[in-house]
Amino acid sequence: MTAQVLTDQEKQYYTPEEYLALEEKAEYKSGYYDGLIIPMAGGTTNHNQIIGNLYSSLNIELKRKPYRVFVSDVRLWIPEMRYYKYPDIMVIAGQPEYYNDRKDTITNPQVVIEVLSNSTQAYDRDEKFKAYRTIPAFQEYILIDQTSVAIDQYFKTANKRWSLYEYDDEETELSFKSFDFQISLADLYDKVEFVEEEQETKKPL
């Protein structure tokens, strides 16, 4: 989901408990970062299509296996960063670990998947990834571009060491490292409509 940046005048600090109480009554979801409540904007049709394609394939493949797949209605709590987030997709190995026994908030994703937007992709690659890396169970981070065929896959190889795999060909498969699952990029991007951006006309020097 896309975060809306608040101005200094609009900022008001809340405790995690105050945030949760407000979130239960709110019409729209918001994130929380170290005292700040951050409204989440709605996603595009491409964003929704990609999430649906991947979620349905994961659910079928992991049926009757010791994994749970959750989409963006389930909240993630990152205690070290004092951060509540709604990742696009999370995969959990074994049983969910709930924060304060709340069935809407978990703390132990093994895989986190985010669909990028132009406004948030730098944040997703940097600050958000840094926050996710503080989660002990976290092993794999997948970033999916919604404007072109492009995927970055980060996989933990050792303590504080991550490998990067890049995908940009519809004829290839995205192969998860945390468990046995593959999906072709053609299937992942099925029914996604890319809009060609107008290129600037270069003037001769």
Image: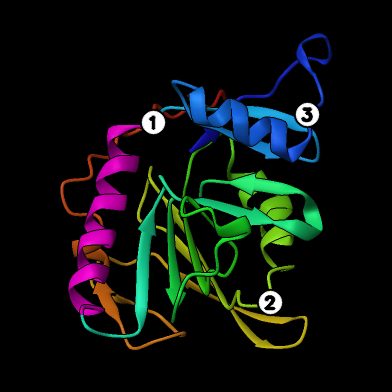
Depicted 159 relative to depicted 41: above or below: below
Task: Determine the residue positioned at 46% across, 24% down.
Answer: 28
Query: Nearest the camera: 49 or 200?
Result: 49
Task: Determine the residue positioned at 64% across, 54% down.
Answer: 77
Label tally: 3
| Mark pair 2, 1: CA separation | 40 Å
Mark 2 vs mark 1: give the one in front.
2
Check residue 197 in the rendering and tell me which mark sits there, or answer none: 1
Specify which label sits upstream in the sequence, 2 or 1: 2
Q: Inspect the image, locate mark 1, and give the three-letter code of the amino acid beneath it.
A: Glu
Q: Specify the principal SS of the magenta part.
A: helix
Query: Nearest the camera: 8 or 13?
Result: 13
Magenta-drawn stretch contains 54: yes
| Mark pair 3, 2: CA separation | 26 Å
Magenta-drawn stretch contains 53: yes
Mark 3 vs mark 2: give the one in front.
3
| Mark pair 1, 3: CA separation | 41 Å
Q: Is residue 146 left or right of residue 192?
A: right
Depicted 72 relative to depicted 201: above or below: below
Q: Quadrant of the C terminus?
A: top right
Asked if marks 1 and 3 touch (Cβ < 8 Å), the reply is no
Q: Which residue is mark 2?
A: 136
Check residue 58 in the rendering and tell me which mark sits there, or answer none: none
Q: Which region is colored magenta?
A: 43-63
Q: Which residue is mark 3?
A: 14
Q: Position of residue 177 (x, y in %)?
A: 45, 85
Q: Does dot 1 land on a helix, a strand or a loop?
A: loop
Q: Inspect the image, locate mark 2, and give the three-letter code of the amino acid beneath it.
A: Pro
